Image (tube, grey):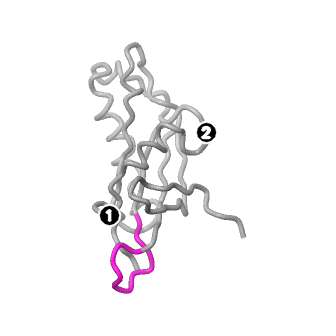
């Protein structure tokens, strides 16, 4: 049986695994249309937060986090990265109360399809406070 698509060790030592992944396109959305690069953070939120919540993809309202990386704000960059990724990550339960696993949806943008989690996004994910944001499920 093959292993998980993505396995990441968080800075806390917790290991998380992507059990499902959705890949979409940003359709070359130009920030100029949305009042320039200053609105890029809000555009990221609109594209990732609202369009693909865990409830739509996986039938549950999982907690979500959006990885925002500074390189989207480079001077002169007027196009969002090509790919928008949404993955359902799981780990061991947060509490020992009969839960099977803890879970959270992670959203990110990147220009290349491989690796599925670019080095910059992987580092941003390593910093996520899983214990505060994720939720236990049975």
The residue depicted at 63 percent of the width and 40 percent of the height is 114
Outermost residue to the right: 1
| Residue 94 located within the stretch drawn in magenta | yes
Q: Nearer the viewer, mark 2 or mark 1?
A: 1
Viewer-proximal residue, 8 or 137? Answer: 8
| Residue 54 located within the stretch drawn in magenta | no
Secondary structure under the numbered disc 2 in the rendered image: loop
> 10 Å neighbourhood of mark 2: few (<14), some, or many (≥20)?
few
Q: CA distance from mark 2 to mark 1?
A: 29 Å
Q: Is residue 66 above or below residue 10?
A: above
Quadrant of image for the N terminus: bottom right
Q: Kindly identify which residue carries mark 2.
A: 113
Q: Position of residue 24 (x, y in %)?
A: 53, 43
Q: Is residue 42 above or below residue 125?
A: above
Magenta span: helix, strand or loop, mainly?
loop
Quadrant of image for the C terminus: bottom left
Q: Which residues are drawn in magenta?
A: 93-103
The residue depicted at 33 percent of the width and 28 percent of the height is 40
Q: Earlier in the sequence, mark 2 or mark 1?
A: 2
> 10 Å neighbourhood of mark 1: few (<14), some, or many (≥20)?
some
Viewer-proximal residue, 28 or 2? Answer: 2
Q: Kindly identify which residue carries mark 1.
A: 131
The residue depicted at 35 percent of the width and 18 percent of the height is 32
Q: Is residue 20 above or below residue 39?
A: below
Viewer-proximal residue, 18 or 59? Answer: 18
Residue 13 sits in quarter: bottom left
């Amino acid at each position: 049986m093959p292993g998980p698509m993505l396995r990441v060790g968080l800075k806390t030592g917790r290991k998380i695994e992507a059990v499902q992944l959705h890949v979409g396109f940003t359709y070359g959305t130009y920030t100029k249309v949305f009042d320039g690069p200053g609105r890029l953070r809000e555009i990221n939120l609109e594209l990732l937060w609202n369009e693909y919540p865990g409830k739509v993809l996986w039938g549950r309202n999982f907690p979500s986090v959006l990885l925002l990386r500074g390189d989207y704000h480079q001077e002169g960059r007027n196009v969002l990265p090509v790919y928008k990724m949404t993955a359902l990550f799981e780990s061991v339960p947060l509490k020992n109360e009969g839960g099977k696993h803890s879970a959270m949806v992670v959203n990110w943008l990147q220009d290349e399809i491989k690796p599925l989690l670019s080095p910059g996004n992987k580092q941003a994910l390593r910093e996520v406070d899983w214990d505060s944001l994720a939720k236990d499920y049975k």
